[in-house]
Amino acid sequence: MASTDPEPLWRHLLGDQLRGIRQDRGQTLTETARRAGVSPQYLSEMERGLKEPSSEMIAAVAGALDTGLVDLTLGVSERLRELAPAQPAQADVRATLALAA
């Protein structure tokens, strides 16, 4: 039976990842925001998935957390893969496309 739950939004998983890294490093929201050059309110909104941050903002916060973009985005991608509804097998997709033609 296929899940009808929508896929989680990338910005929500990014926020969770940022918050987790920050807390693991023992940094406060204010400290990380200062190091990244953003306001604490903006960082809080990023962490709660309320902002769709630019790549520059993501890079700034990643740098403030002493992590790289590759590690950050891989963590988000892995979590997305865990939470995303199961995708139909490639053969099922081809069969559906053939029927639609």
Image (tube, rainbow, N blue to C red):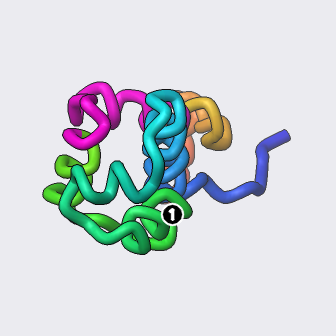
Our reading of the magenta stretch's main secondary structure is helix
Disc 1: which residue:
49
Within 10 Å of disc 1 (Cα), the crowding (few <14, some 14-19, many 20+) is some
> Where does the magenta region start and end?
63-80
Check the picture and name the quadrant holding the N terminus: top right
| Residue at 58% in and 35% down | 92
51 within the magenta span = no
Q: Nearer the viewer, residue 19 or 28?
A: 28
Q: Is residue 98 visible?
A: no
User: Residue 22, image x and y in percent?
Assistant: 45, 39
Check the picture and name the quadrant holding the C terminus: bottom left
Q: Residue furthest left?
A: 56
User: Residue 71, image x and y in percent?
Assistant: 30, 26
Secondary structure at numbered mark 1:
loop
83 left or right, relative to 54: right
48 left or right, relative to 45: right
Among the 4 quarters of the image, the one containing residue 55 = bottom left
Q: Nearer the viewer, residue 52 or 37?
A: 37
| Residue at 78% in and 43% down | 2
74 within the magenta span = yes
Tell me the amino acid under the disc marked 1. Answer: Gly
Q: Is residue 20 above or below residue 13?
A: above
63 left or right, relative to 75: left
Q: Nearer the viewer, residue 50 or 42?
A: 42
51 left or right, relative to 99: left
